[in-house]
Amino acid sequence: MIELSVKKRLLSAEGSLELMLETTIEEGEFIAFFGQSGAGKTTILRMIAGLETPDSGHIIVNGTPWFDSQKRINLPPAKRPIGFVFQDYALFPNMSVKENLRFALQKGDNPAIVEELIEVIGLRELADRLPAQLSGGQQQRVAMARALVRRPRLLLLDEPLSALDHAMRHKLQDELAKIHQRFGLTTILVSHDPSEIFRLCGRLYHLEQGCIKKAGTPSEIFVKEKISSSFKFVGEVLAIEQCEMIYLLTVAIGTQVVKVMATEREREGLTIGSPIQIVSKAFHPIISPITHDDREQ
Amino acid sequence: MDAEFWTTMTLTFKLALITTIILLFIGIPLAYFLASTRSRFKPIIETIVSMPLVLPPTVLGFYLLVAFSSEHAFGKFCEEVLGFRLSFTFEGLVLGSVIFSLPFMVHPIQSGLQNLPKSLTEAAQMLGKSRTTILFRVLLPNIKPSLLTGIVITFAHTVGEFGVVLMIGGNIPGETRVASIAIYDEVEALNYATAHNYALILFAITFFILLLVYLVNRSFMHKV
């Protein structure tokens, strides 16, 4: 369990702002800090990691104080057992994939974890390559694996997928979800992408001007109107085509891509990448069992 | 070319080599400190390190000469406690060159370190690594071109130094007489041929050293 109660004055482009945060995060949760850039999301992550110091307050993780302004406790970053994935991945350019992971080993650690993680991220063939020879998605996976070598109980992700294209982002979101399940890590994600948060997180904090504006589950926060419905999906617009009087939207829902019709009014304000919800109130669903062949497709 | 010519040449390169090695040991920690500190004394330290770039060599030479003299505390200390004299000796030349060439080693390394993304250091910190481990395993291997530049420029600059050496070393063959002084001396004595021998060798060596730096740095660039 993480108890957070911190204050810090931030200097941003729009002047100074007071970051104030008080909350607790339960063991094993996958939560997100969401908000505009400059709202203080990344700073919160960096304060938990010890890369920045709060002006006052305390950070207590599983009963151990990592930071306490009154007792003058401030554990250096190297002493905090955290996995941190940076926005730019921060892979060491002089080390191969395997060396990047090995560097994360501590004295006395069993090196077998490196091999195991290389398998998990599926980069066996690329293990001897330098980071510069990898694609963005591959680099991201290496960064992820490297953060897991120390077997941290807490994983901090700073916009980990923002530099990737659409398809790769979706793929890696699934992998993140799997890793979260497999290792049962308390995971904190910083993101400004609602669809990403929808897919991954159980709970989120919406930050504005350094303060929590709203907290709750993704559907509580993002889905404004309450509609009683039989079916409701949340997805992301991939393409918009015009067909005579109507529009055809290609939408990614989960791992599937579907096409739905939209009227001119519905289409207004939508661009590629917009998060949308699709609700169907009355229709006749056709239900059929899935055979093995269908699943292969 | 006589024996004296070779003695002078050897002395010149010995001085440059020793100076470069000493500066490598001083320059790396100093550059690391300057690149990472948030101390308010940083501008003062940076100014002191950079002074030799703009100060007339004779000014520096003059103060060193005064400091080295056995009539002053520092010179007296060296002579009585450490047991060696600094004025008009090779040891004195090394110390003078170290001070004079300091910015040529510190600047490239410092700017190399500052140009590395901050997240590299932070990522290594998050992996539980100490500052020393981070410096040697993560930072220095990624600024090889800057290290090479620092080493070579320091070496070449020490080979070419004239003013400070003349002030504190004088012109003692085999002890403090380096090539740049020898050229001046031979020209004064109207021995143009000997002066030309020194000059041509310095010219050629400097050219090839710098060419090597640019070629090697180019291949570093292509590799990344």
Image: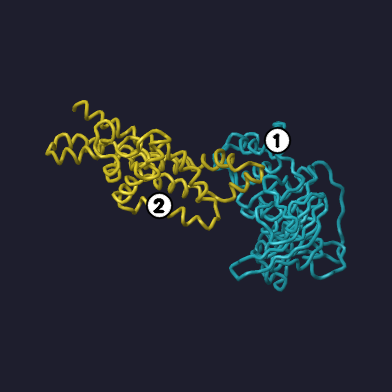
What hue represents chain A? cyan
Horizontal side of A80 relative to B219 (left or right) equals right
What amino acid type should be assigned to the residue bearing mark 1? Glu
Q: Which chain is yellow?
A: B
The residue wearing badge 2 is B50
Quarter residue B202 falls in: top left
Q: Residue at x 24, y 37 (%)?
A: B171
Chain of the residue under the numbered disc 2 shown in the image: B
Horizontal side of A262 relative to B212 (left or right) equals right
Direction top: furthest residue = B3
- The answer to whether any part of residue B214 appears in the image is no
Height in image: A219 above or below A116? Answer: below
Q: Position of residue B153 (x, y in %)?
A: 36, 42
Nearer to us in this view, A116 or B209: B209
| Quarter of the rendering occupied by the C terminus of chain A | top right
Q: Position of residue B136 (x, y in %)?
A: 55, 38
Q: Residue at x 52, y 48 (%)?
A: B33
> Of circles 1 and 2, which is in front?
2
The residue wearing badge 1 is A119
Height in image: B95 above or below A274? Answer: above
Chain of the residue under the numbered disc 1 shown in the image: A
What amino acid type should be assigned to the residue bearing mark 2? Ser
Nearer to us in this view, B211 or B163: B163
Q: Position of residue A113 (x, y in %)?
A: 72, 34
Q: Residue at x 70, y 35 (%)?
A: A119
Describe the element under mark 2 as helix, strand or loop.
Answer: helix
Quarter residue B68 falls in: top left
Query: What is the spatial separation of the Cα atoms under label 1 and label 2, in whole angstroms?
Result: 51 Å
